[in-house]
Image: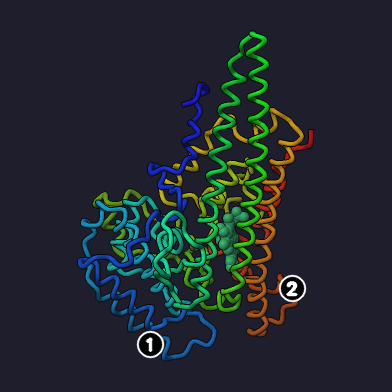
Amino acid sequence: MSPLGAPSPKTLEANSSHDVDSRTGFMAPQIPLRRLPEPWEPWEVLLDAAISAKLQPGDAIGITEEDRSRSERWRTRIRESVILDTIGLSSSDILLRRAHLVLGFLMHFYVQSLPPHSPVLIPKSISIPLLKVSTILDMPPVVTLSDTVLYNWDLKSAPETTSSIDLDNLCCQTLFSGLKDEEEFYLSSARIEIRGVEALEIMHLIAIEIANCHDVNGAGTKDAVLVSANYTTAGTSINRVTNHLYRLAVVINDLKRLLLNVQNGCDPSIYYNDVRPWFRGEDSDHSKRKWIFEGLDGLLESGTLVKPPTELSGTSAGQSSLIHSLDIFLGVDNRRPVLGDAGMVKTPSFLERMKTYMPKKHRMFLGDLECRKPSLREFVVEKNEQSLNAAYNASVMALKEFRDSHMIIVARYIIGPAHRDAEATKQKSESLEGVDSSLLKGTGGTDMVKFLKGVRNQTAEAVVGTA
Ligand code: HEM
């Protein structure tokens, strides 16, 4: 701990207590387990069956009778499956992560392939083990970004070097649709997470400088020689922080480029019609159906679960610990709910809520990051040096531009196809207002246009005045 009782700069160092790796960041440090071992093989077999049957979302445009009966046959298999024991999973995070992924995918396949107005009754063979595994991991019983991205990566070919990961050599293990578009969608997040490792390193270096500078200035000595020496150290520290912040802006710009590259392999209408429907959570269900987990009462009565699951939003890159880290580190105040954020009526805000969908140790990382004193922003405001202010603003504006680009992507991948859908279903809408508002909800249940604009504006508000 520093003299002020703040967490040491080590908080930002890649370390195992936070499951943050110096090569892969928040992504699993090694290629995640590709298949559960024998006792749980029946789940893998059911997942293979869903993928190879090319199940369609129940409300897919142009779904045929044959599609419907194929998915009903698969759901019958799920209902008739035995409930497998999860005890052997609990001692290994590696097994638990794969189990969460497999059971989460099975549940989303089950729920989303149902006819649009059928009740959502999740059979015991999935609900009981999923609720148990999720409780151990302290994560919601739904597919999260950790399932689709962090613990779902693989390499196309043996790497030439083990020191870094070639972003073009990444591929995914498990997909709903089996389509390249879905894979590219997950990989755009994966590449951002890995490129973001440099951002984490820079944050760590800045944290060291701030801690040093603070210790030096806090010495409070009256000795003239030492005071001038202190000024020199503080001065060079400010220069180093300035340089690091410009480097951080370059990395954030790269994240933006990687985000926009999603367009190279993921077609917007395929994403909208064939990929996105699988992620929907309870709060983005068009028919507003409640998800009922069979066997839940028994788990509550036995004390295996203390309360019914409440977090059932669909997966969203709003769960990216990297982007949350950048916000926290730069001092973007995005905890205030914004218009369109479901958190306006229920606290906490959407972005706060998304933290509960992150792996527990990543949540702890963010918690520690938040406690840092002085924060970067406090340091910048206190020093009020022109060059430092400009460098800080460059990083903040790079993050704001990342969000501008993200909004362009959302317009192309959701708003555009939603319009085309509305036209196809003869709604004849000319404006966004003409589109069924449930179609313009994020998978996390937000009123996405207002919400994303709000977060983008909050980012821009973090800039400091020039000295
Ligand atoms: C085709 C690509 C993408 C689409 C269509 C998309 C869509 C959305 C939508 C609709 C939201 C609103 C929240 C919700 O889910 O309800 C959202 C939030 C968010 N997305 Fe994406 N997204 C895409 C790719 C990415 C990628 C690659 C990242 C990188 C990490 C990302 C980062 C975020 C973040 C951080 C939020 C929370 C809002 C914010 O902090 O600005 N998204 N996204």
* Residue 357 visible to an observer of this rendering: no
Q: Quadrant of ligand 1?
A: bottom right
Q: Residue at x 42, y 66 (%)?
A: 155
Report x, y in % for residue 266: 57, 74
Residue in front for this viewpoint, 219 or 266: 219
Name of the residue lying farthest toward the right = 467
| Element assignment for label 1 | helix
Q: From the viewer's perspective, is 61 left or right of 336? A: left
* Residue 67 visible to an observer of this rendering: yes
Q: From the viewer's perspective, is 76 left or right of 171? A: left
Name of the residue lying farthest toward the front = 160
- How far, Cα to Cα, is label 2 from label 1? 37 Å
Residues at circles 2 and 1 in contact by the CB criterion of under 8 Å? no
Residue in front for this viewpoint, 343 or 43: 43
Q: Residue at x 65, y 42 (%)?
A: 245
Location of mark 2 (residue): 431
* Kind of residue at badge 1: Ser
Which image quarter holds the C terminus? top right
Mark 2 or mark 1: whose residue is earlier in sequence: 1
Q: From the viewer's perspective, is 35 left or right of 198? A: left
Location of mark 1 (residue): 69
Report x, y in % for residue 228: 68, 16
Q: Residue at x 51, y 68 (%)?
A: 285
Query: How many dots with numbers?
Result: 2
Q: Please, is residue 149 above or below residue 21 in the view?
A: below
Report x, y in % for residue 264: 60, 73
* Kind of residue at badge 2: Ser
| Element assignment for label 2 | loop
